Image: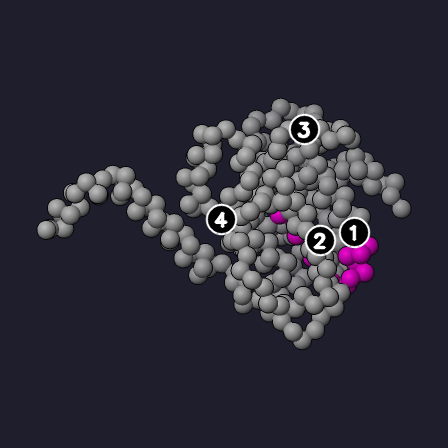
Amino acid sequence: MSLWSLLNTPVWGPGSVLLILVLLLRLSVQVWHKLYLWDLQCCSTDLTGKIAVVTGANSGFPTTLTPEGLDLTFATNYTGPFLLTNLLQGALQRAGSARVVNVSSFRQAHGYIDEEHLIGAGRPLTFNQNYDCSKLLLASFTGKLAQRLQGTGVTVNSVDPGVVYTKIMRHFSWPYHFLFWLLSFFFKVGSGGWGRALLLSALYSSSSPVSLQDSKQGAIPVLYLCLAKELDGISGKHFNSSCVITLPPEAARDCHVAQSLWNTSVRLTNLDKVD
C-alpha cells in the first residue's frame, strides 16, 4: 500500500490529523519547557532554617464585597498582600536577607488603575477585568515596596507564572470549560489558583543542599524568584513565565500613581494605626 493510500484511509480523517497535530504541538511545548526553563533539580540553594510564608491558591471569584466593604478580588490579590507584607516588614528586615515574591499575571496588561475599585466602586469593570486590574495594582505595589526597602536586604519582585490550568474554571459556564480544556493542552498544569506567594528567605544556612521533588510547571517561575542565587540583590523587577526580566505595564511604573495607591491602601487597611 502506498503512503498516499495509507493517508487517505478513514483512520486518517481530518479529526485524526488534527489530534496528531495537537499532540505534536503539546510535545513541542513540553520539550521547550524542559530545555529552556530554569531547572529546579539543579538548584543548590540551601533551605535549612529558612522560613517561607505562602498565601493565595484560592481561585480569587465571584464579585463579592468583604465585611469591611472591600471588593473580594482586589482584597485577595492586592489589599491582603499589601497589608500582610507591610506587617511583616520588621521580621523581613531582621532576617538580614529576604525575598518578597508577588505572583502576577500577563493579564495585568489588560487592567487599569482606579483606586475606587478597592471598595467595589469606580469605573464599571467588564468580565474578569477585576482580576486584570487587581494584578496591575500588585505590580505597582511591587515597584513601590522595592523602592521603600532599598538597602534593607529585602528584595521585592513580581513574576507571571504563565497560563496555569486551575480550579478557577469552576466559576465559568460549560462552553468556557470546554474551550479551556482544549487550550489546556498548551497550558501549564496546576492544582490550584496562583494568587501570590510571599517568601521570607532568610535566617540560617548549612552545608547540605536543597533536594526537592518535581513541582508543577506553573510553580517553576515562582520558585525561581524564591530560590535562584543569581537573583540575590535583584529588586523591583518583573519576570515573565520564562524567568526573564521584562517591563511591567506603563501604569505600574508611574511613580505618582504608585504613591497615591500606597496612600489609599494605607488608609483602607488602617496600616497607619498599627503599632
Q: Looking at the image, is mark 4 or mark 1 nearer the viewer?
A: 4
Q: Looking at the image, is mark 1 or mark 3 nearer the viewer?
A: 3
Q: Earlier in the sequence, mark 1 or mark 3?
A: 3
Residue 40 left/right relative to 91: left
Residue 147 left/right relative to 184: right
Residue placed at 66% from the left, 34% from the top?
Answer: 73
* Residue 105 shown in magenta: no
Residue 197 image position (x, y, % from top left): 66, 50
Bounds of the magenta segment: 88-103
Q: Which residue is mark 1?
A: 88
Circle number at residue 53 = 2
Tell me the distance, in whole angstroms, between the alpha carbons under discs 4 and 3: 28 Å
Circle number at residue 64 = 3
Foreground residue among 53 and 265: 53
Q: Earlier in the sequence, mark 2 or mark 4?
A: 2
Residue placed at 26% from the left, 43% from the top?
Answer: 17
